[in-house]
Image (cartoon, grey):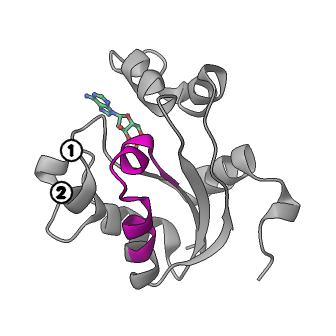
Amino acid sequence: AGRRTLTIVKPDAFANGKAGLIIALLEKSGFTIKAARVMHLTTAQAGEFYGVHRERGFFGELVEFMTSGPCMPLVLERDDAVATLRTVIGATDPAEAAEGTVRKLYAESKGRNAIHASDSDENAAIEAAFFFAGTDVLAS
Ligand code: CMP
């Protein structure tokens, strides 16, 4: 399994003042930060990033939420990065997330759920390239 994944600390976490605590939990979970930026997504960017969900009933709500304030994409590194990060962030719905996970601790709802994580090595590479130029990601 690959050593890199892409995460996004979402606008609800910035609105609630929890972005730093979430990043601290990621570091405590063994991830190191290889790239980061704070940005306010446009509607076009959010729609493209979540294009796979375009036909879903929650797509409009998702784009509206993701453009509601700043977010923070990061490239993270550790062994077995994709699977480990998905365990650390917990289930999409915080009501179903395990104790100690990012979403159990910091998410408000299934939509306002604090954090995104790539679901495969292939998507991690695609998603990292969406937000970062190769030169903006540390090589090692
Ligand atoms: P994420 O893992 O970033 O990728 C897809 C997102 O769609 C997911 O997080 C949720 O925030 C959002 N999502 C999934 N299901 C729902 C839903 N029923 N209502 C609103 N948003 C949802």
Asked if the residues shown at circle 2 and circle 1 are in contact, with their CB atoms under 8 angstroms apart, the answer is yes
* Quarter occupied by residue 85: bottom left
Check disc 1 and give the amino acid type: Asp
Quadrant where the N terminus lies?
A: bottom right
For label 1, the residue is 93
| Circle on res. 97 | 2
Relative to 59, is 76 on the left or the right?
A: right
Residue at left offset 41%, top offset 28%: 65
Residues in magenta? 8-24
Relative to 49, is 94 on the left or the right?
A: left
Residue at left offset 88%, top offset 63%: 135
Q: Is residue 82 visible?
A: yes
The answer as to whether callout 1 falls within 8 Å of ligand 1 is yes
Check disc 2 and give the amino acid type: Ala
Q: Give neighbour class at mark 2: few <14, some 14-19, many 20+ (Cα, 10 Å).
A: some
- In this view, the residue in front, 4 or 114, is 114
Image location (x, y in percent) of residue 76 = 58, 70
In three-dimensional space, the C-alpha distance between marks 2 and 1, rounded to whole angstroms, equals 6 Å
Please, what secondary structure does the residue beneath circle 2 have?
loop
User: Does residue 31 belong to the magenta stretch?
Assistant: no
| Circle on res. 40 | none
